[in-house]
Amino acid sequence: MKISDQRPVMIRWKDTLVIPRDPVVTEEMGGTEVDEADSNVGCETELVEASS
């Protein structure tokens, strides 16, 4: 069950990163980067932390 649970978690993990930082990214980048950020979750995380 843990293995099956990890699969959806990874999908939700991306959404979780985008959802709370959606308003932040929307204000700074205009929200257009949100779609690209989904593919570049790692890069987005570094950018957000650097901005903080």
Image (cartoon, grey):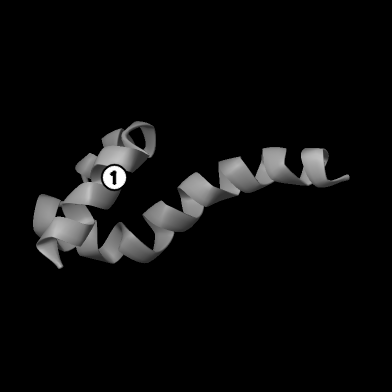
44 on left or right of 12: left
Q: How many marks?
A: 1
Q: Give how far across and how far down residue 16 sits, in percent.
A: 48, 57
Q: Secondary structure at mark 1?
A: helix
Residue positioned 81% across, 39% down in the render: 4
For residue 21, above or below residue 2: below
- Single out the residue that lies furthest toward the right: 1
Q: Residue 14's x, y, as percent?
A: 47, 46
Residue depicted at 17% across the width and 50% down the height: 47
Q: Is residue 21 left or right of residue 14?
A: left
Image height of 49 relative to 39, above or below: below
Give the residue at x 11% y 58%.
28
**Residue at the spot of label 1:** 34
Does residue 14 appear to the left or right of 1 in the view shown?
left
Q: Quadrant of residue 21?
A: bottom left
Tell me if I can see residue 20 in this picture.
yes
Q: Residues within 10 Å of mark 1 (few under 14, many from 20)?
A: many
- Position of 21 relative to 35 (above/below): below
Position of the N terminus by quadrant:
top right
Quarter occupied by the C terminus: bottom left
Percent coordinates x, y for residue 44 in the rendering: 26, 45
Can residue 26 be seen by looking at this rendering?
no
10 or 18, nearer to the observer: 10
> Please, what is the three-letter code of the amino acid marked with disc 1?
Val
Name the residue rendered at 70%, 43% in the picture. 6
Decide if residue 26 is on the left or right side of residue 28: right
